[in-house]
Amino acid sequence: MKFLKPIALLALLVSTSCTQKTHPDYFGTIKPTHPADELVINAATEPQYLDPVKVADSTSRILTSAMFSRLTQSDPNGGGDIPDLAESWEISKDGREYTFFLRKDALWSDGQPLTAHDVEYSWKRLMDPKTGSTYNSMGDVIENAREFRTGKISLDKVSLKAKDDHTLWVRLTKPVPYFLGLIEYMVFAPVPKHIVEKFKAEGKEDLWVRPENIVVSGAFILVEENFKQYKIYKKNPKYFDADKVRLNTVKAVLIEDYAASVNAFKTGQHDWTAEASIPSDQIESLKKYKDFKFDPMLATYFYFFNTKKKPLDDPRVRLAMSLAIDRKSIVDNVVRQNQKPSRDLVPYGIEDYKEPESEIYNPELAKKLLADAGFPWRQRVSKLTLKFNTSDNHKKNCGSRPRYVETGFGDSC
């Protein structure tokens, strides 16, 4: 779900009404408070990282994706994986070897050429445990990457090499049909080796993404930031597709309070806010407006179990806990954003993939599983602690307190 004010419609309304700022069909204003070549969004919260290789949260992903191109990108029209930094590629008959041919006009924002050597450096930086990437295991699809990541072999054994400035060769551990889509994720974005290594040599590697230091390959570059208040991005004139970028400025405001974000949109302080920044109890009332829209998101939301602690080391207890949660009730009555209840890790909507549609709610089976694990009916298993970020909807989700006690669980948040 997204909550937005479409740019094309905005321009049309302004041309027909010079003074009117509101319209009964729209929740937000219909007259912009800023130039037409500027977009203001609410990114909600301060991103954890702007270094692509360390991205692990949605805010970081959104704000870095505008600055760093990848070899491939997803076709917005649903046509699969299409070229980005890579103009084309060849795949071996066994599906394990990929040869990418990079654009010759790709430049870093400081004017330096972006080469296959940057890509090789960046992907190997992802694999290196010293980098501290949360998602470094995503590189394990590359032959010998896991062995290097776990300290069993040296980096030069990894099957990844820049053959020249514009050709990158990679061999996978086995055929991976989704590889072209996988490398569209932010952790595979090339970073400028000459900049990262400069700051690394000075013992200040984390500082290379500051506005005064950052060098990018994408459409926008960070030029100003105020911690937990805003970030300002300007069009990158060195971007290879710069002539198609219509915006000159993007300002990301960081309004964490959901009610404040909605009010700011209503008064025209920003043009778009993500689904995560809308109070769930306002969803129904907002649906009638034309500037409110639900869009599907290819994602799965889940909680981790600490399987090293009793009783969660018993798979029967874990399955019982999963089957005791009424996901449909949470979707219908708490979060209310058209989510699809599921117990499967792979999200709905993957091309050529049929979801197993595992059973999502069965309290009677949960009771039996607990009994089999040594916890008869009405004997509490434990008081469990649920850790979550402090966004408003997370608090409501916890506040709804799914009654694990009905099957023997404590219900602490």
Image (cartoon, rainbow, N blue to C red):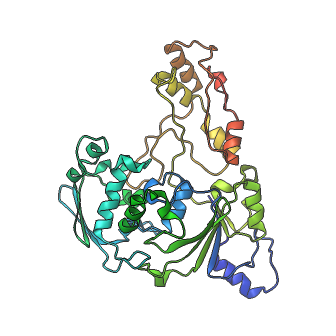
Q: Quadrant of the C terminus?
A: top right
Q: Quadrant of residue 409?
A: top right
Instruction: Give how far across and how far down residue 109 sits, in percent.
Output: 44, 76
Instruction: Give how far across and how far down residue 57 sits, in percent.
Output: 53, 52
Rendered residue at 74%/78% (across/down):
33
Residue 349 higher or lower than 108, as above or below: above
Rendered residue at 53%/14% (across/down):
371
Q: Quadrant of the N terminus?
A: bottom right
Task: Give the residue furthest to the front.
Answer: 202
Q: Nearer the viewer, residue 310 or 156?
A: 156
Residue 359 higher or lower than 389, as above or below: above
Count the labels in the image: 0
Q: Is residue 189 left or right of residue 231?
A: left
Task: Give the residue furthest to the left.
Answer: 93
Q: Is residue 128 left or right of residue 47?
A: left
Instruction: Give how far across and how far down residue 220 sits, in percent.
Output: 51, 73
Rendered residue at 39%/66% (across/down):
70
Q: Is residue 131 left or right of residue 40?
A: left
- Residue 178 can be seen in this image: no
Q: Nearer the viewer, residue 115 or 247?
A: 115
- Residue 120 can be seen in this image: yes
Instruction: Give how far across and how far down residue 63 sits, in percent.
Output: 54, 63
Rendered residue at 54%/69% (across/down):
211
